[in-house]
Amino acid sequence: WGFRLLLAGAALNFIAIAANGGWMPVDPQALARAGFEEEAALPAGSVLPSSKGVVAVREDTTAWYLTDIIAVKRPLRRVVSVGDLMIAAAAPLALAEIVLRNRRARAGWHGPPCR
């Protein structure tokens, strides 16, 4: 399930970026809520420094609900998308699946018999 969730999150991000000309739109209100006041004041269409994102208001954004609209203040100051959250949740799950699979393989356990 970890890898499936990881791929689903990546797919959501891909859809958002592809639908918006190759850039991930970032909501200026979310930027302000996360503490990025200078970036929030940039005009729409401005590329954010050191980022994959571009400032875009909701009205000018295709599939805005898949874009960077979620402000995270603590522990990290970020603006993220639903896809980013899915990837963040899936990464430790996928890692745990790999570790468990390797432990089972070393112990000689190959799962229940096929019927």
Image (cartoon, helix red, strand yellow):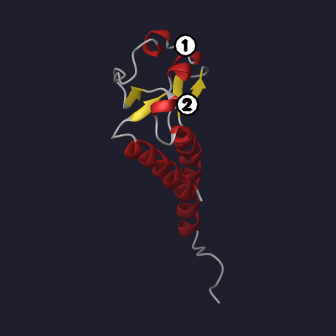
Which is more N-terminal, label 2 or label 1?
A: 1
Q: Disc 1 vs disc 2: which is toward the camera?
A: 2
Task: Name the residue type under label 2.
Answer: Ile
Numbered mark located on residue 69 in the image: 2
Element marked by disc 1 = loop
Q: Residues within 10 Å of mark 1 (few under 14, many from 20)?
A: some
Decide: marks 1, 2 in contact (CB < 8 A)? no
Tell which of 99 and 77 is nearer to you: 77
Q: In which quadrant will I find the C terminus?
A: bottom right
Q: Residues within 10 Å of mark 2 (few under 14, many from 20)?
A: many
Whether residue 77 is visible to the viewer of this picture, yes or no, is no
Q: In which quadrant will I find the N terminus?
A: bottom right
Residue drawn at the location 60% of the way across and 73% of the way down: 109
Task: Name the residue type under label 1.
Answer: Gly
On screen, residue 30 above or below 113: above
Whether residue 84 is visible to the viewer of this picture, yes or no, is yes
**Residue 32 image position (x, y, % from top left):** 54, 15
Quickly name the residue at label 1.
35
Marks 1 and 2, how far apart at CA: 13 Å
Numbered mark located on residue 60 in the image: none
**Residue 67 image position (x, y, % from top left):** 50, 37
Residue drawn at the location 33% of the way across and 40% of the way down: 22
Q: Which residue is outermost to the bottom?
A: 115
Tell which of 40 and 100 is nearer to you: 40
- Classify residue 54 as left or right of residue 68: left
Element marked by disc 2 = loop
- Classify residue 44 as left or right of residue 71: left
